[in-house]
């Protein structure tokens, strides 16, 4: 059963095929973002079992179609995004203060119960309702300053469990949207608003 609640602050304890080596795009920042617009050149590396093991877990398979749309950023590109949009002096989400990205009315939900129940769709239904983004929206999933992947909102929603094998405060966000989600190791997902 999905538990939904509220909190007063974002309590953060906190193409398998060819991927272009570099993709450049004009990014329009979300409303209220500290940068109005920026030209970002993101570089990707091919996914592989050693570095991206969470997408190759036999008990939690990712389809070839989805895997072809999960693009790990190079360490340098991940660091550039982190410095520009998250923090220039903190390198891991668990080190971020509670007021880093304030919650949207303190809304949160439990993700860990559904993570253990393959048949449950309650959490992903909550995510889609909380973040009513078009399926093609590009999202960034960030585990740390040097570790991020880019994919689509639809792929994330289909494969969300694979992204959460490492649950030490990762961030789900989009350069096109103001909302974000931070996942806590206590099994909570906090709906936040990028500042």
Image: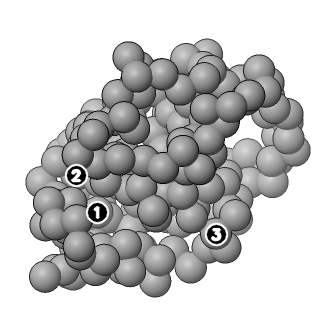
Residue 22 quadrant: top right
Examine the rendered structure and indicate whether residue 15 appears above or below residue 128.
above
Report if the CB atoms under discs 2 and 1 are less than 8 Å apart: yes
Q: Earlier in the sequence, mark 2 or mark 1?
A: 2
Q: Which residue appears at 22% of the width and 65% of the height?
A: 118
**Marks 1/3: CA distance?**
20 Å
Q: Which residue appears at 67% of the width and 73% of the height?
A: 134
If the image is split into quadrants, where does the N terminus sit?
bottom left
Q: Which residue appears at 60% of the width and 23% of the height?
A: 46
Secondary structure beneath dot 2 equals loop
Residue 121 picture location, percent across and down: 30, 77
Residue under label 2, please give it: 184
**Marks 3/2: CA distance?**
24 Å
Residue under label 3, please give it: 135
Examine the rendered structure and indicate whether residue 54 appears above or below residue 112.
above
Q: Is residue 176 left or right of residue 139?
A: right
Q: Earlier in the sequence, mark 3 or mark 2?
A: 3
Residue 111 picture location, percent across and down: 23, 64
Q: Residues within 10 Å of mark 3 (few under 14, many from 20)?
A: few
Dot in front, 3 or 2: 3
Report if the CB atoms under discs 1 and 3 are less than 8 Å apart: no
146 or 120, which is in the foreground? 120
Residue 180 picture location, percent across and down: 48, 60
Q: Earlier in the sequence, mark 1 or mark 3?
A: 3
Q: Residues within 10 Å of mark 2 (few under 14, many from 20)?
A: many
Residue 72 picture location, percent across and down: 56, 30
Residue under label 1, please give it: 189
35 or 157, which is in the foreground? 157
């Amino acid at each position: 059963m999905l538990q939904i609640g509220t909190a007063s602050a974002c309590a953060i304890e906190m193409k398998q095929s060819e991927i272009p080596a570099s993709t450049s795009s004009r990014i329009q920042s979300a409303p209220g973002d500290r940068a109005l617009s920026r030209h970002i050149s993101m570089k990707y590396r091919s996914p592989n079992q050693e570095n991206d093991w969470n997408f190759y877990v036999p008990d939690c398979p990712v389809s070839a179609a989805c895997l072809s749309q999960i693009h790990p950023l190079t360490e340098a590109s991940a660091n550039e995004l982190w410095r520009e949009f998250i923090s220039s002096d903190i390198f891991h989400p668990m080190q971020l203060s509670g007021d880093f990205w304030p919650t949207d009315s303190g809304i949160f939900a439990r993700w860990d119960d559904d993570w253990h129940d393959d048949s449950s769709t309650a959490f992903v239904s909550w995510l889609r309702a909380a973040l009513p983004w078009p399926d093609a929206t590009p999202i960034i999933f960030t585990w740390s300053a040097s570790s991020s992947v880019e994919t689509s909102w639809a792929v994330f929603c289909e494969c969300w469990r694979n992204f959460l094998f490492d649950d030490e405060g990762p961030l789900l966000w989009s350069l096109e949207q103001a909302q974000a989600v931070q996942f806590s190791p206590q099994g909570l997902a906090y709906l936040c608003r990028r500042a």
